[in-house]
Amino acid sequence: MQENFSLKSYNTFGVDVKAKYFTEAETIEELKNAVNYSKDHGLSVLFLGGGSNILFTKDFNGLAIKLSLKGISEEHLNENEVLVTAKAGENWHEFVMYSLEHNYGGLENLSLIPGNVGTSPMQNIGAYGTEIKDVFVSCMVLDLENLELRIFDLGECRFGYRDSIFKQEGKGRYVILEVTFKLTKKDHHIKTEYGAIKTELENLGITHPTIQDISKAVINIRQSKLPDPKVTGNAGSFFKNPTIPLTQFEGLKQNFENIPGYPNGDSVKVPAGWLIEQCGWKGKQIGNVASHQLQALVIVNATGNATGKEIYDFSTEIISSVKEKFGIDLEREVNII
Ligand code: EPU
């Protein structure tokens, strides 16, 4: 247990806040001990995964527990399917690389997403036409109410767009300890529908892509427009892409004929990056904070010295201008602490 511990290297924004107490849990026993300690001492707890979807706006006056449970195991179901279970503290991208080295298909479109395996179900991480719900089987959690272990299957997780039970009713109650995915061993479903992938494969001169090729294309696309958090602090997309009623979208089309939208029944998903860019924010810097010059949806700690409050205030200004120009409410995707 450490006191007044800097969390600067535990959040990808690189915001320098302190936790009153900090400890790392490598096993379930260590995790339970830490939770019991917090209960005995009346401390609030904060669980840290990869720190890639969190914005600290102030010091944390409780016990921060870094989840460092490690290990990957496999259960072969048949000639084509394998269950792969990874513990919460495994780095997501390294886990994807492990699956590709074994030629297991299903995770390739999710290459290079920052964060750890344990946080992937929280917001049903997704990119380039795939979400983890597509390959998710179950996850094991610690229930903080009774310190018992429990399994959540696919249906029980209630996955939605950047959403799950762990962000809704289950918020703050469960700690995800390990996640099991069903991957393919030979009959891989190659997903190239997402426009940018097709173009990138063409650039690479690949006509019959393997899962490894898809991963390579995704890595190239991400590296070409998303900032590397090791170089410039950020948490990926700061906002969700808003869903608006079709009627509202049609109304907006009258004034903004180029507005992009992905219809789904009576509603349309509009890319927040486009809305933000139209309001003049792309590449704009105020003090230490900026909207990324290649992807307006990403807010960056441009100088490395931004405070969480500055980043939060910057995001509030973006929300106001999008509301004013388009009448659309942007919702933050990043967890604000
Ligand atoms: N766009 C702009 N200006 C911008 C950014 C985007 O006009 O500054 C337009 C693009 O031209 C494109 C559309 O918005 O037509 C969509 O852009 P992109 O393909 O980059 O995807 P996105 O909707 O901005 C989402 C995810 C990303 C994920 C990509 C690829 C959300 C909130 N974000 O971004 O996820 O990598 O799709 O699948 O759903 C993350 O969650 O941290 C993240 C990076």
Image (tube, rainbow, N blue to C red):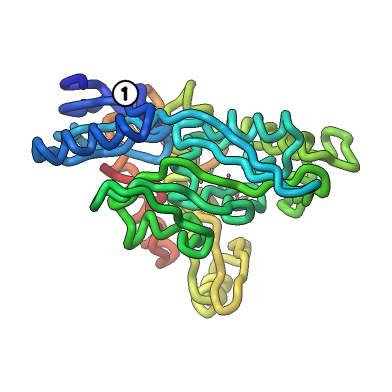
Disc 1 designates what residue?
Answer: 8
Q: Position of residue 170 (x, y in %)?
A: 33, 58
Q: Position of residue 160 (x, y in %)?
A: 50, 62
298 to the left or right of 5? right
Q: Residue at x 42, y 41 (%)?
A: 177
- Between 276 and 108, the residue placed more toward the observer is 108
Relative height, residue 21 to residue 171 (above, below): above
Give amino acid for label 1: Lys
Relative height, residue 169 to residue 179 (above, below): below
- Between 143 and 48, the residue placed more toward the observer is 143
- Between 104 and 282, the residue placed more toward the observer is 104
Q: Residue furthest left?
A: 41
- What is the quadrant of residue 21 in the picture? top left
Q: Residue at x 49, y 66 (%)?
A: 243
Q: Residue at x 48, y 22 (%)?
A: 230
Q: Residue at x 31, y 26 (%)?
A: 24
Helix, strand or loop under label 1: helix
Say if residue 310 shows up in the picture.
no
177 to the left or right of 213? left
Relative height, residue 134 to residue 11 (above, below): below
Kindly tell me whether mark 1's CB lies below 8 Å from ligand 1. Answer: no
